[in-house]
Image (cartoon, rainbow, N blue to C red):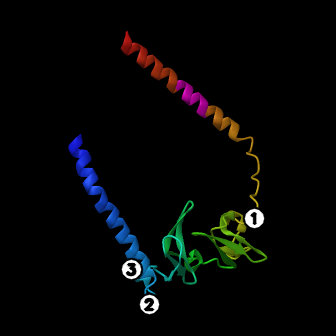
Amino acid sequence: MERYNLNFSLFSPFILLLTIFTFNQTATSQNSPSGDGLCAAVFCGQGTCKNINTWPGFECDCYSGWNKIQIGPLTFPSCLIPNSCNLIWCADGSCLPNGTEHTCQCNEGSENLANNTKLPCFQQCYFGADCHDLGFGPPVSTPPPSPSGSSETSNSWRSVCVLTMILSAATSLTLF
């Protein structure tokens, strides 16, 4: 134990000096006349780097249509996420970016396909067919089934009962 404490106490000043030297180099490089500071070593993706006086010492300004990655309260500094509306076609509507997602806002007289705001907007009967079958508008109620279907249902039920009785008989014969 004493040897460990002795080695650790000899090693501690070196860690302290290394820390002071590292922070001193960072401080002098940020105040250098070239003005690069940390931005010389930072990749901002689709953005430009600018030195700031708070931690981490730089900030990326994203180009139009690009965003930073945000996971909860943490923001990754590089601009790597494209505007989701750059790749989306909303047809008869306009795309509204919502973080890394999008929403298609329809023009008057148009609706989203299948009433899903992530899908394109189309005018009523744009496809030349029955728009309700394509998912436009409120669902159409179906008529009640005809009474003739009840006899078919009872015949099916009888068949199931007969098969169940045959299976029960076969199972009981194999057991005895």
Q: Can I make out residue 81 in this image?
A: yes
Residue at coordinates 69% horizontally, 75% vertically from top-left? 122
* Main SS category, magenta section: helix
Q: Is residue 159 magenta?
A: yes
Q: Residues within 10 Å of mark 3 (few under 14, many from 20)?
A: few
> Mark 2 belongs to which amino acid?
Pro
Asked if residue 91 is positioned above or below residue 159 in the image, the reply reads below
Q: Quadrant of the C terminus?
A: top left
Q: Is 76 in front, or is 10? A: 10
Distance Cα–Cα, label 2 vs label 1: 65 Å
Distance Cα–Cα, label 2 vs label 3: 16 Å
Give the secondary structure at mark 1: loop
> Mark 3 belongs to which amino acid?
Ala
Q: As drawn, is 138 to the left or to the right of 61?
A: right
Q: Is residue 77 magenta?
A: no
Q: As drawn, is 7 to the left or to the right of 79?
A: left
User: Residue extending furthest right?
Assistant: 108
> Mark 1 belongs to which amino acid?
Gly
Q: Residue 158: give x, y in percent of width and height.
A: 59, 28
User: Mark 1 against mark 3, which lies toward the viewer?
Assistant: 3
Residue at coordinates 64% horizontally, 77% vertically from top-left? 90
Q: Residue 88: give x, y in percent of width and height.
A: 58, 76
Q: Can I make out residue 39 in this image?
A: no
Question: What's the magenta region?
Answer: 156-162
Label 2 sits on residue = 33
Residue at coordinates 53% horizontally, 25% vertically from top-left? 162
